Amino acid sequence: MKKKILLHVSLALVAAMPASVMAYNKYLLEVNDSCGYEVINDCVSCHDANDYAAPTVFKDQYTVSGACSFCLEVACDSAPPTEDELYADARQTTRDYFKTLFSEFMYHLNLAKNPEHPETVFADVFPACPEIAPKIASDFSRNTGYLVRRVTEKTRNSRNTPDDWELQQLQKFRQMAANGEPRTLLEVTKPDGNILPTQEYEAFEVVVEAEVNGNGKSRNKSGEPRAYFRYMRSITMPGMPDEPPFLPCLKCHGAPDQLGPGVEEAVMAEYPYDQAMGYAKGDIRGAWTVKIPLDALP
């Protein structure tokens, strides 16, 4: 986030520069990006203030050695990230998203509590509840530059419809669960600081996808396919709130006799085509998904 703020500062300075300075400013921005911090010097430090187009040893240095040669730090991150680094980043992003969503949901749930009718809390949390996850996903996507969201085969909100790759992974997760295949222990920090141990399935790979919009037209200027690192982690339905890990998911997504009072009516009022009820403990509810655009293959 710091890099993005600094980059915006650089761009603001660029707007005030003459055109000849702007031509060279791309070098400065690339150095900043490689080093991971704002380089204080501007183009004048490498070019004659009266003739920015004049060749200098610094331009030659950039051409021969790249932006990293200007970085005073030991490490330079201009090289493409490795698959392990992308995997770790996607995992951390998912953990942070889950933690934030969990915290926001519990906050809204507490606001919805009515001391006179505590049993209706899950119905009362609508319509705030359906807007929590998309808002958080949008914030994470905007701040990271990744596409971060949840997907499911049985949607409540149509924005959670999986694409082809995500659907394929969801189907694999369901088959793995049916076969009793071992899951990965993935710990999540709850809002109260306690650790929530979850057992889930994961999938990740680098895929190349055509950049097209709903009309079949290319989204990018070149019209070429683009590479992405894709990551998914299953969401398994826990038991009832009175059994470990003590989560209330079935109160809004379970069988009719498990739903909270008034929940079905509240859900159908907001989502008349809802498919997200009728789950049982252990079912694959959906998945967290992170899609990272790549400028180069790892």
Image (cartoon, rainbow, N blue to C red):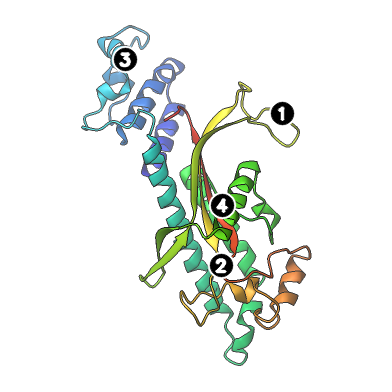
Q: Which mark is residue 217?
A: 1
> Which amino acid, by three-letter code, is at mark 2?
Gly
The residue beneath circle 4 is 149
Residue 252 on image: x %, y %: 64, 73
Within-10-Å neighbours for mark 4: few <14, some 14–19, many 20+? many
At horizontal 64% and vertical 64% (from top left) the residue drawn is 130
Q: Are marks 3 and 1 in contact (CB under 8 Å)?
A: no
Q: Which residue is mark 3?
A: 49
Whole-Å distance between the Cαs marked 3 and 1? Answer: 45 Å
**Label annotation for residue 275:** none
User: Tags 2 and 4 in contact by the CB under 8 Å rule?
Assistant: no
Q: How far apart are the alpha carbons under marks 2 and 4?
A: 21 Å
The Cα–Cα distance between marks 3 and 4, rounded to whole angstroms, is 48 Å
144 shown above or below 156: above
**Of marks 3 and 4, the one in the foreground:** 4
User: On the image, which quarter does residue 284 sit in?
Assistant: bottom right
Q: Amino acid at mark 4?
A: Arg
Residue at image x 43%, y 14%?
20
* Of marks 3 and 2, the one in the foreground: 2
Q: CA distance from mark 3 to mark 2?
A: 68 Å
At label 3, the amino acid type is Ala
Q: How far separated are the C-alphas under marks 1 and 2?
A: 41 Å
